[in-house]
Image (tube, coloured by chain):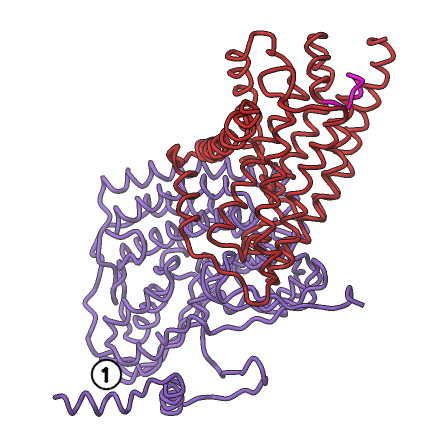
Chain colours: A purple, B red
C-alpha cells in the first residue's frame, strides 16, 4: 500500500541545488522520479517592457543585465538587431573585438558550468579547481573591458574600447594557461571513474527528442545535432575564422560535459586567430539617436545555445517592442523529458546540464493557482487592487495610510 | 573512584573526546581545503561554530514529535561517547574492558545512525525523511563489510575483546600487516558511516538540502555535528587500535603521541578520499558495497582463517 504512494517534494523556488529561484515540483516514488512540474516566473523582472520606456542607448546597458554570465551575448544580439534596422556598417575591428569578448565569455561560462556540475554531483574539488582557473579569464575580461561581468563594451555602431598590443600579449599568455588547464579537465572528466559513473547514461536525450523539443546549444550538440549559429548564420567576425562545431553522440550529461570542454579548445583557437587577423581601423561609427522604423531579428550563439532578439522600431528614440528568447527557454522543456524515471540524485545534474539561466528565461504568461489549478491573467490595475486587498487582510491599509500621510502634510 | 570519574569525564573520557572531535573536524576541513587549493579555516573554527550554534534559537517543526526530536541528538552523542571508553588509546588496555567488548563498540557505533534516522523521520520534513531513509539504506550496505573487516582481525587474535587484541598484536609484531585488506575495507566503510566523501548521500545538499538534519537548528544541530565529529575520532581510534596496533610499549607519553599520529593519519586518509571522489548515487553505493567491499572483506576473513591455522598454532 504505502510503497505505491507517490509523494511530491519541492525542488525550489528556494533550494541549494538551484542558484536562481525556480520551482520544480517532483513526484517521487521511492528514489525514482515519476513526474516533474516546472513553474517559471519567480524571477521575472519585466526587462522587455522596461526597454520600451528607455532610449536605445540605455537599452544596451539594460539588456546587458538580463544575464550575469552571458551579458555580452544579450547586448551584442540587441545591438546587431538595432544596427540592422538603422543600416549601420560596423567597422571590421569592432566586429573582431566583439568576437574576442564573446569567446572569452564562453570560456568563463563553460568554466563556471564545469564547477557547478562538479558541485551538483558532490565533487567540490572540481568546483574549487575550475573556479580558481576561471579567475584567469575573469582577470583578462576585467583588463580588456574594465569589468568582470556586464562588460559594457558594446555600443550601437561598434565597441567602446580598443585592444592594444600589450593587452594582446596578456590575452595570449592567459589563453596558454587556460588551454593547459582545459586539457587537464578533459582528462579528469573522461578518466575519473566516479565522475563517469555519475554522468554517463544520465539525462538521455535522443537526437529525435532533442529536435522535437527544440533543444539548442551544447544540449543539442551533445545529441548529435550539428547546429551552431556561429557557423549556420555567422555574425560578427565568425565567417572569417576557422573552427569546428563540436558534436557528440553520447546524448547524455557526459556528452554535454565533453562538448563543453572541447568547445573551450575551439574558443582558444578562435581567440588566437581573431587576435592575429584583427584589422586596423576605427572601432565604431556614429549611430543616430533616432532609429528609423523597421524590425529585425538577430541570432547569437550564447554559451548556452541560440539566443534570439527581436527589435521593432517606430522612428523614435525608443523601441516599440523588444523580445528576447534566451537559450534556456528552448532547453527547459527537455528537462522534464530527461528526468522521467530517473533517480532523485540525478535531478540536480540533469537540470544543471542544460546550463540553466532562469532569470533570462523567466516570463509571466498566466498565473495559475497551485491549489485550485485555475489560470488567470491579471492586468496591472487588477494586480494592484489585489495587493491592496491582500495587505488589508494583514491589517495594513495603504489607502488609509496615504490619506493620513496627506493630512500630515 | 575519583580516578575513574576523572577518566570518564575528563581524560581520556568526555572532555578530551569533545576537544579532540573539534580538532578532528578542523583537521578534516583544513586538509580538505588545502587539497582543493583553498586556505581553509583557522584552528578555532569548529569551536566557534559550536558556540554559535549553541547560542542560536532552536526551532522545532510544529508537526514533529518534540520529545523524539530533542532526544535523538543526545542519544546519538552519548552512545558515540560510550564507545570511546572501550577503545585502547595509548595503553594496551582500555579504560574499561571485558570479553566481547569489540561487539559492543560496533553496536554502540551503529546507534548514532539509527538515532539520525529516527530524528529525521520524526522531524516530518520531506527532505529529512528522504535523508533518513537513505542513511538507513546505507547502513545495511556498509555495516556488513565493516563488521567482517574488523572481526577478521579479531579472529586472528582469537579474541572478541579489543584490549586482548592489542595485547596479541603487540606480542606478535608485524602480524597487523596481514590485515591490510581489512584496513582498506574498514576505512571505506567508516567513510560511509561518517556520511563523508563519496558516501555523503543522506545529506547530499544539492538533492535533499541537509537530509536528516534539515529541520534541526541551534543546540540540537550543534550536538548532531559534534556527534559526527566524535564518531570520526572514535571510528579512527577503533581502526587505529584494530589495524595499527603498535607503539604501546614505550610508556604513556610516547604511546599517546603515537596514538595521535595514527588518528591523524586515518583522518588524513578520510579527507583524501573525500577530496578525490564525486558523490555516488544510493544504488551505486549499495552495488559498490556488496560487489566490491564485501568480497574483499571475505577474502580477508578467509585469509585470516588459513593464517590462523598456519601461524598461530
The magenta segment = B155-161
Residue B156 included in the magenta stretch of the image: yes
Q: Position of residue B96 (x, y in %)?
A: 65, 24
Figure label count: 1
Q: Which quadrant of the figure contains the C terminus of chain B?
A: top right
Considering only vertical position in the picture, is A68 above or below B17?
below
Q: Position of residue A9 (x, y in %)?
A: 61, 66
Q: Which quadrant of the figure contains the N terminus of chain B?
A: top right
Q: Nearer the viewer, residue A348 or B96?
A: B96
Q: Nearer the viewer, residue A175 or B131?
A: B131
Considering only vertical position in the picture, is A229 above or below B141?
below
In the picture, measured across the screen, residue B294 lies left or right of residue A310, that is right
Q: Which residue is mark 1?
A: A316
**Quadrant of the rendered image containing residue A314:** bottom left
Q: Position of residue B22 (x, y in %)?
A: 47, 35
In the picture, measured across the screen, residue B240 lies left or right of residue A405, that is right
Considering only vertical position in the picture, is B50 above or below A222?
above
**Quadrant of the rendered image containing residue A150:** bottom left
Q: Residue at x 28, y 38 (%)?
A: A169
Residue B162 included in the magenta stretch of the image: no
Amino acid at each position: 500500500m504505502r510503497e505505491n504512494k507517490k509523494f511530491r517534494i519541492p525542488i525550489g523556488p528556494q533550494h541549494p541545488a538551484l542558484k536562481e529561484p525556480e520551482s520544480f515540483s517532483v513526484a517521487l516514488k521511492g528514489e525514482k522520479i515519476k513526474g516533474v512540474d516546472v513553474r517559471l516566473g519567480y524571477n521575472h523582472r519585466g526587462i522587455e517592457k522596461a526597454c520600451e520606456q528607455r532610449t536605445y542607448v540605455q537599452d544596451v546597458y539594460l539588456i546587458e543585465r538580463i544575464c550575469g554570465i552571458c551579458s555580452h551575448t544579450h547586448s551584442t544580439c540587441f545591438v546587431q538587431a538595432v544596427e540592422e534596422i538603422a543600416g549601420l556598417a560596423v567597422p571590421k575591428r569592432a566586429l573582431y573585438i566583439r568576437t574576442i569578448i564573446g569567446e572569452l565569455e564562453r570560456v568563463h561560462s563553460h568554466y563556471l558550468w564545469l564547477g557547478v556540475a562538479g558541485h551538483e554531483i558532490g565533487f567540490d574539488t572540481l568546483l574549487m579547481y575550475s573556479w580558481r582557473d576561471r579567475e584567469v579569464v575573469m582577470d583578462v575580461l576585467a583588463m580588456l573591458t574594465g569589468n568582470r561581468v556586464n562588460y559594457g563594451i558594446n555600443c550601437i555602431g561598434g565597441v567602446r574600447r580598443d585592444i592594444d598590443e600589450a593587452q594582446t600579449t596578456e590575452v595570449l599568455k592567459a589563453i596558454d594557461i587556460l588551454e593547459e588547464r582545459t586539457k587537464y579537465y578533459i582528462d579528469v572528466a573522461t578518466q575519473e571513474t566516479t565522475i563517469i559513473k555519475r554522468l554517463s547514461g544520465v539525462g538521455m536525450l535522443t537526437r529525435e527528442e532533442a529536435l522535437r523539443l527544440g533543444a539548442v546549444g551544447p544540449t543539442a550538440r551533445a545529441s548529435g545535432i550539428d547546429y551552431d549559429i556561429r557557423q549556420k548564420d555567422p555574425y560578427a567576425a565568425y565567417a572569417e575564422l576557422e573552427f569546428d562545431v563540436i558534436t557528440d553522440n553520447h546524448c547524455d550529461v557526459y556528452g554535454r560535459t565533453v562538448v563543453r570542454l572541447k568547445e573551450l579548445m575551439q574558443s582558444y583557437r578562435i581567440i588566437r586567430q581573431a587576435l592575429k587577423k584583427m584589422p586596423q581601423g576605427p572601432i565604431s561609427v556614429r549611430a543616430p539617436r533616432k532609429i528609423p522604423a523597421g524590425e529585425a531579428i538577430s541570432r547569437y550563439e550564447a554559451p548556452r545555445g541560440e539566443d534570439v532578439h527581436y527589435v521593432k522600431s517606430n522612428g523614435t528614440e525608443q523601441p516599440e517592442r523588444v523580445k528576447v528568447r534566451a537559450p534556456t527557454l528552448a532547453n527547459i522543456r527537455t528537462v522534464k523529458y530527461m528526468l522521467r524515471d530517473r533517480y532523485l540524485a540525478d535531478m540536480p545534474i540533469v537540470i544543471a546540464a542544460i546550463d540553466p539561466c532562469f532569470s533570462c528565461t523567466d516570463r509571466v504568461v498566466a498565473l495559475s493557482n497551485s491549489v485550485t489549478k485555475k489560470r488567470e491573467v491579471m492586468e496591472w490595475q487588477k494586480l494592484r487592487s489585489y495587493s491592496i486587498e491582500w495587505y488589508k487582510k494583514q491589517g495594513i491599509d495603504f489607502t488609509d495610510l496615504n490619506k493620513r500621510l496627506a493630512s500630515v502634510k | 573512584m575519583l580516578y575513574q570519574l576523572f577518566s570518564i569525564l575528563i581524560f581520556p573520557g568526555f572532555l578530551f573526546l569533545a576537544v579532540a572531535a573539534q580538532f578532528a573536524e578542523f583537521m578534516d576541513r583544513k586538509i580538505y581545503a588545502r587539497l582543493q587549493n583553498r586556505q581553509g579555516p583557522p584552528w578555532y573554527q569548529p569551536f566557534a561554530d559550536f558556540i554559535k550554534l549553541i547560542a542560536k534559537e532552536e526551532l522545532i517543526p510544529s508537526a514533529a514529535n518534540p520529545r523524539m526530536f530533542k532526544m535523538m541528538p543526545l542519544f546519538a552523542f552519548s552512545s558515540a561517547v560510550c564507545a570511546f571508553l572501550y577503545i585502547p588509546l595509548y595503553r594496551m588496555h582500555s579504560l574499561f574492558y571485558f570479553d566481547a567488548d569489540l561487539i559492543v563498540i560496533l553496536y554502540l557505533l551503529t546507534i548514532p545512525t539509527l538515532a539520525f534516522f529516527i530524528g529525521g523521520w520524526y522531524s516530518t520534513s520531506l527532505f529529512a525523511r528522504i535523508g533518513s531513509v537513505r542513511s538507513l539504506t546505507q547502513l545495511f550496505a556498509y555495516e556488513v563489510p565493516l563488521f567482517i573487516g574488523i572481526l577478521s582481525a579479531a579472529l586472528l587474535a582469537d579474541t572478541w575483546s579489543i584490549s586482548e587484541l592489542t595485547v596479541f598484536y603487540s606480542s606478535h609484531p608485524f602480524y597487523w600487516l596481514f590485515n591490510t585488506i581489512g584496513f582498506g575495507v574498514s576505512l571505506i566503510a567508516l567513510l560511509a558511516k561518517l556520511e563523508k566523501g563519496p558516501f555523503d548521500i543522506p545529506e547530499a545538499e544539492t538533492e535533499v538540502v541537509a537530509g536528516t538534519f534539515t529541520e534541526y537548528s541551534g543546540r540540537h544541530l550543534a550536538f548532531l555535528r559534534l556527534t559526527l565529529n566524535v564518531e570520526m575520532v572514535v571510528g579512527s581510534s577503533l581502526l587505529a587500535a584494530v589495524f595499527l596496533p603498535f607503539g604501546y610499549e614505550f610508556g604513556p607519553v610516547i604511546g599517546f603521541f603515537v596514538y595521535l599520529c595514527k588518528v591523524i593519519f586515518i583522518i588524513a586518509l578520510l579527507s583524501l578520499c573525500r577530496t578525490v571522489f564525486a558523490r555516488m548515487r544510493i544504488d551505486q553505493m549499495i552495488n559498490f558495497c556488496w560487489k566490491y567491499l564485501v568480497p574483499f572483506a571475505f577474502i580477508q576473513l578467509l585469509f585470516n582463517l588459513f593464517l590462523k591455522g598456519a601461524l598461530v598454532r
